[in-house]
Image (tube, grey):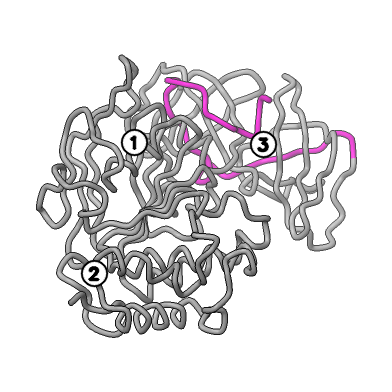
Amino acid sequence: MARRIGVRELSEWMERASRLAGVTMVFDGFTAVHPTDLHIPAGEFHSILGPSGCGKTTLLRILSGFQRPSGGHVLIGGEAVDHLPANRRPTAMIFQSLALFPRMSVRENVAFGLEARGVSKRERIARADELLALVALEAHADKRPDQLSGGQRQRVAVARALAVEPAVLCLDEPLSALDLKLRQHMRSELRSLQKRTGVTFIYITHDQGEALTMSDRISVMNKGRIEQVGTPTAVYDAPATAFVAGFVGEQNVFTGKVTSVEKEFARIDGPGGTFTGRRTPDVALGDQALLMVRPERTGLVDGDGNGSGVNRLTARVEGRELEGPYLNLVTRDATGRRIVLHLANDGSVHPATGATVIGFRPEDAIVMPVAERPVAAAAEH
């Protein structure tokens, strides 16, 4: 008999890590996933973040057994599971569509996987009720899915997946169809459920906010390759590549030639001025480089010269965009470069139009060699 999540000790599988070892996927000559190694400790909430078509869903399907890789191995707890189909792996999958059975009650939906495994009716009902209590839906056990809200249906899908006590719960963009407020609420719900159950969650998303909010660690994927794995703080504050820097959050981007390198800092000279920032280890004197700084780390300099940092330039304010607690100040410098400032909407008077001086600290900027243009940057649109 399977042991119960949240009541008894975690099963043997839950004490084991998941690993992709040299996994690759080729479709009709197109490499969707290049050779990939990824280690996910047991009990981690791990997000795979990237744009559409980057290969993240393919990786999830390989791990859960819905796709056979072209090469490499999937291991859970050090044991290869390549030969096991999806229904025999210690994994469960939640798809975007949720795939709840419309003619079954909520309780029957949750118990379905246990029935398929030959668990007795009495035990199935007890287990389903236990899980419905875990997701705060015990009062809705006899309803059909269409009688629930979108957020409640999400929780039913999670309860049904947890019923079979997986070592790994795979979630393929399950919140994408929900409205903003419900998505934000469900982020907290999913994170709380993961903490309470101790099950490893592997979460696929293109939404940086979801990944940053919920994850213990994030893998950022681009064109079939994982470019960086790290904590949300590390990925956001210390991006390893220009793609990661631009995809995870916005950036104001400056280009130029590296004219000085000193310890962890580098200075670039280019159109619009001379600026200094923290450098990545591969930056060298004479390189063509990008300097990127987050809009929230870019500020105004007042008439007395007080304000953000030693990197300064004059720009013209073109517009203001209100986002509730934040105000986006949109500016352009003398070269036509678009520079955005994210300011607190604290009642301070900010210029509506006209010339102003803006700046940022070297510690808040990052300099890396020109290899590729950053994605979704705030500047140079």
On the image, the x and y values in percent for residue 249 come to 56, 43
The label number, if any, that marks residue 118 in the structure image: 2
Three-letter code for the amino acid on which mark 3 is drawn: Arg
Instruction: Identify the disc placed on residue 226.
Output: 1
Q: CA distance from mark 3 to mark 1?
A: 35 Å
Relative vertical location of residue 39 with respect to residue 184 in this rendering, above or below: above
Question: Badge 1: few (under 14), some or many (20 or more) residues near its Cα, within 10 Å?
Answer: many
Residue that extends furthest to the right in the rendered view of this protein: 353
User: Which residue is rendered at x = 55% and y = 60% of the image?
Assistant: 102
Residue type at numbered disc 1: Ile
Give the residue at x 89% y 34%. 354
Between marks 2 and 1, how big is the CA–CA gap? Answer: 40 Å
Query: What element does badge 1 sit on?
Result: strand
State the residue at coordinates (64%, 43%): 295
Q: How many marks?
A: 3
**Considering the numbered disc 3 on the image, is that residue within a helix, a strand or a loop?**
strand
Foreground pick, 365 / 48: 48
Q: Mark 3 Cα within 10 Å, few/some/many (few <14, many 20+)? A: many
Q: Is residue 377 magenta?
A: yes
- Residue that badge 3 annotates: 312
